[in-house]
Amino acid sequence: MLTNILIFIAILTNIVTLALVYFLFKKSTESSNTIKTNAAFLENTEKQIESLQNRFKESLENIISKDSLMIENTSSNIIKYYQDTVNSLTANYNFNSQKLTENLNLELKKRVDQLITIVAEQSEESKKVFSSEIQKDLVLIKKDLVNYSQGKFAQVDAKAYQIISETAKNTVGKVINMVDHQELVMQALDEAKKDKFFG
Amino acid sequence: MKKEFTLFTTAVYDTKGLYRLIDQITSINKNLYHNLPGTIVSKTKGLLPPSLETIFSYIEDQGLEPEGDGAQKQFLEQIVTELKAVPLVKITLAFEPDDSFTSKLNETISVQAEQKVILDISVNHHIVAGAVVEYLGKYKDYSLEPKVDQYLKETVKKEIAEEQVKSKQELHSYES
């Protein structure tokens, strides 16, 4: 019994498998037809695309040419406008600069004249002050000079006196003879006696 | 002062003589270590100068000299002590005095001082003449130097001032 069941199951399984295979085979033949259809469609599409591209290209070139003319015109106009503007600005600038320079020169001249006058006045004033200061300094310097020369004279006098004094003493001492020297010493001792120097 | 010491101090007038005498007595002292009998003169025969020999002989004759080395040494030391104790008078002269004038000076001053003095003599030509004396802390100038200075101040400075005025006048006249 069991063997029969098993055989029955096996046969059933085979049948199912065959059915499946047949089903799949059917399917595949359908897809290959689809593929062929699609390929033809694709080819057609490509041609259309190419045609579209060409047309687009033509339009674009057309547009570009028109645009380039327009751009050229516009650029020329812009350049011309720019040049005119620059020329006008330059002319204005030059004119204004000249005007400004003239005004500045006038103003400068006026100020310089004023400055000259002020400087002249102040230098006169300074001259007066300076002269009086110099006078004062001169007086002081003269005084210092007099004091200095007096001081120097005094020094010279002292030195001269010292030299003369030493020379005189040396000379007078040598001129006195021994006897007179001894006599003068005894006279000195007599004076000391009167003064009670030793007693 | 005892008589025997006075004999020695009397023989000296100035510091030169004093130091010479002290040297001589000190050298005699060195010869009294031999413990020999006799007087100082006999022990130091030939070593004493004549002036000292005379003095020592006189002292011996008067019996004033002690006997024995020890006592004699002490005696000599006492003489030196007495000599150093004599007061000094510093005197400055304008010339170098000879011995006779030195002794005359000493006598004169010793009489005035009423005691024996010894002169410490120095020479300075700047004092011109006379003497400058110093005694027991006192000092006095009895030389001609102050008088010469006075004369020079009055006369020479006046002449220098006149010269100055003259030279200034010359300078002014030159500047003008």
Image (spheres, rainbow, N blue to C red):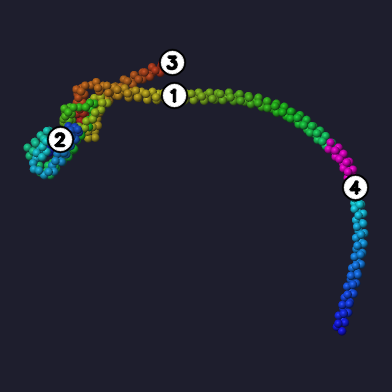
The answer to whether marks 3 and 4 sit on the same chain is no
Whole-Å distance between the Cαs marked 3 and 4? 126 Å
Disc 3 sits on a residue from what chain?
B
| Residue under label 4 | A54
Tell me the crowding category of disc 1: few under 14, some 14 to 19, or many 20 or more residues within 10 angstroms, Cα based: few
Q: Position of residue B105 (x, y in %)?
A: 18, 29
Q: Position of residue A39 (x, y in %)?
A: 91, 57
The answer to whether marks 2 and 3 sit on the same chain is yes
Q: Position of residue B2 (x, y in %)?
A: 12, 38
Q: Main secondary structure of the magenta part?
A: helix
The correct choice, above or below, for A111 with respect to A4 in the image is above
Q: Residue at x 90, y 45 (%)?
A: A58
Identify residue type, mark 4: Asn
Disc 1 sits on a residue from what chain?
A
Identify residue type, mark 2: Thr
Q: Are marks 3 and 4 in contact (CB under 8 Å)?
A: no
| Residue under label 1 | A145
| Residue under label 2 | B9
Q: Are marks 1 and 2 in contact (CB under 8 Å)?
A: no
Whole-Å distance between the Cαs marked 2 and 3? 73 Å
Secondary structure type for disc 1: helix
Q: Residue at x 92, y 64 (%)?
A: A30
Whole-Å distance between the Cαs marked 1 and 2? 66 Å
